[in-house]
Image: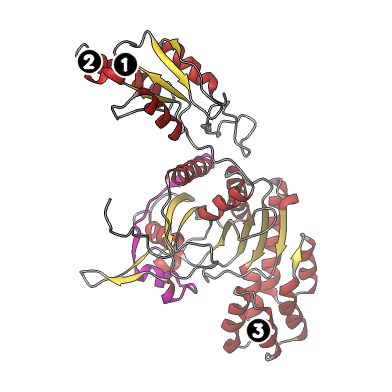
Amino acid sequence: MTDLPPLQPPPGTLDLLPDAASARRRLEARLRARFERWGYREVVTPTLELEEVVRRAGGQLPARQLYRFVDREGQVVVLRPDWTASVARLIAGRLRTAPLPLRLFYIGSVFRYDRLRPDDPREFGQAGVELVGASSEMADAEVMALAWESCREAGIEGPHLEVGHAGYVQALLDQLPATLRADVQQALVRRDFVTFEALLGRSDVPDRVARLLAGLVEARGDARVVRRALDECPVESARAALASLERLIGHLASLGLGPHLAVDLGMVKDLDYYTGAIFEVYAPGGGASLATGGRYDTLMARFGLPLQATGFALSLERLTRARQRRGLPDGQPRLDAWVVAGDARADEDGGAGAVWQLLRRLREAGLVAALDPLARPLEESVEAARQQGAAWVVLADARHRADRLRVRRVDDQGDHPWQETDAGRLVELLRSMRAPAGPSPADGEDGTTGRPRAHRPRH
């Protein structure tokens, strides 16, 4: 110990302690398995990107949101603020001749200086997919259904899917004077409806279009919202967008998402590369969106490879918070066995080797086992096991080899007596004390995607 004050991570970033880090990795593993089951393959791009990549992708991320600096070669680089632009660069380069459609996914951090919400960190985890080279509403439906199922995979029961269409909003905005479009769009992005309506009041557009624009604020509900807009809309390109959205909703209903689906025709993204159907997924009860995405048919062309595409990104932090609000267990892996070597560590007759063999046998049986690395009195080892969250203490000293071990339960229910057993029966004992690993809430009937949840044994 010294008098040096402890250092903290940079503002807006987080250290993940062992339980939180373990929970994050398990969440990532579940999402990875879900994506792979749908035929998506993982890609990993550098955390650093040339600023040119972000600039080509466009969007409305201001420069002040970027972690940006000049490297030793004089190149302007940024910490990745968005995965989609990086994947687009990758596809237009090394995957340029790959067979289409491409189904890719990613899991990793992105960095933005300004936080959308006070509880959003500046470095946050995203997991998402990109489906490139497919332009149909079925492709849109696949991506939306996968986003919805991914939220269930994370343990969020009954998530809500809200859909809109960037093409519809853009077609209406195109009826405004060019000098007003960007400001009106920004007001929609910010959900600043006072400014939005004030700007509309300064425009000179046909009454029917003005009504549709003003109605974007309240154009929310079930599929009938789309039909009503179709009946009223005089702008042909906007009508085409609505007709496409109506077909998409039919596919989503066929996928069983009808009860969880809502329409929001006023939905606008802060990234301007979206061109078609867009969506967000929320946990029941509201809060920030867990997943967001949509169709971006012009982005790939900005990298020299014109291809239609759609995709989404999940926020790992928001998924974690949504799980915590619902009291869902993180299923932290706990120690099944805290192995105490005792005098075997100094035994010249192979005692230490027997301890290592016992530890290997337990681990190969799928159990979590750790050695007490300190030479100390047995009762201190037992207390250390309790502090480490172990279920059992296993004494494997020189007098008690694998054929005659002493074991003792460790919990807060009082003292438990020592028992004698052998290594084979110990494995069965520890396994039997684990809670059964059932399928995840989002698993199919076969339960094959479920990952065993490690539990503190119930005594």
The answer to whether residue 56 is magenta is yes
Residue ID for mark 2: 347
Q: Nearer the viewer, residue 455 or 339?
A: 339
The answer to whether residue 234 is magenta is no
The crowd level at tag 3 (other Cα within 10 Å; few <14, some 14-19, many 20+) is some
Q: Name which quarter of the figure residue 209 lies in.
A: bottom right
Query: Where does residue 290 sit, x and y in percent of width and height?
Result: 58, 56
Residue ID for mark 3: 195
Vertical placement of residue 352 versus 328, above or below: above
Q: CA distance from mark 3 to mark 2?
A: 80 Å
Residue 356 appears in view = no
Query: Where does residue 337 sit, x and y in percent of width and height?
Result: 42, 24
- Circle 1/circle 2 CB separation < 8 Å: yes
Which amino acid, mark 2? Asp
Q: Nearer the viewer, residue 75 or 407?
A: 407
Of pointers 3 and 2, the one earlier in the residue sequence:
3
Q: Choose mark 3 or mark 2, whichever is in front.
A: 2
- For the record, the magenta segment spans 35-64
Residue ID for mark 1: 397
Query: Where does residue 64 sit, x and y in percent of width and height?
Result: 42, 76
